[in-house]
Image (cartoon, rainbow, N blue to C red):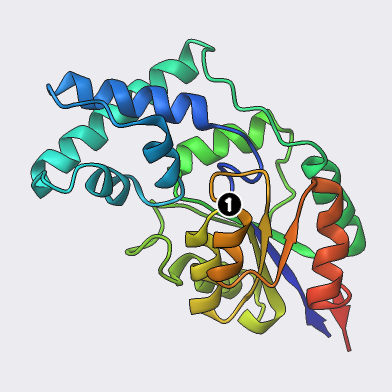
Amino acid sequence: MTLRLVIFDCDGTLVDSQHGIVRSMQQAFLSFGLIAPDPDAVKRVVGLSLDQAVGRLAPELGASDVWQVAGAYKALFRELRAGGDLPEPDFPGVLDAIGALDAAGYLLGVATGKSRRGLFAVVERLGLEGRFVTLQTADDVMAGKPAPDMCLQACAEAGVDAADAVVIGDTSYDMEMARAAGCGAIGVAWGYHPPGELEGAGAARIVGHGDEIPAAVAALLGGARAA
């Protein structure tokens, strides 16, 4: 019996976390006397590991400065969450899609540039404990997106071949990760990179609403199990 795995991105796919991310990143830069990055520029790097994101926003910084800014970002983001000032609404239809895929017998996972602590907080808030057989974060791999590491590790943990897995995400990094790992890729139109970029990066399908996800997965992978 062949199992099928559906790997979701988090930020921009499951939840709209841009406001907390942009606010924390801008404040982190300002705390070191740096120019705050433009919100659109910050959204462009969502999905990358934190050090990669800071490095792309400020390529003139050395490695030690990148890590200092990244550390400030983490502290500021945690403060927002602890203070209840971190809006991260789930996108319409996505939770229902997760329930439908689970009921149909697909294995589910997450691969995200978030920290493990941050992902656990989202999973708990959305009431998704126990839904996922594998959770991959920036804390778990040597190389984050768009490298294939998180995909390959998710497949290994789930006992699924990469060809029997699909990544659902909102950025070109998600699509490139899937392609590099040999997984299928489905792009979502409600996230932080436009659909054309997702298609150019390898998305086989683009969905415009969460309720379209189960059909797109079935079209790409077939049923949850195959003989």
Q: Residue furthest front?
A: 196
- Which amino acid is tagged 1? Pro
Q: Is residue 55 left or right of residue 224?
A: left
Residue 227 location (% of width, % of height)? 89, 89
On the rendered structure, is 155 left or right of 95? left
Query: What residue do we see at 43% from left, 65% from top?
Result: 146
Q: Can you identify the residue that label 1 sits on?
A: 194
- Which of the 4 image quarters holds residue 96? top right
Q: Secondary structure at mark 1?
A: loop
The image quadrant where one finds the N terminus is bottom right
Tell me what residue is drawn at x 67 percent, y 78 percent. 160
Identified at 54% across, 50% down, the residue is 193
Residue 133 visible from this viewpoint = no
For the residue pair 125 and 47, the one nearer the viewer reads as: 47
Residue 161, quarter of the rendered image:
bottom right
Quarter of the figure with residue 22? top left
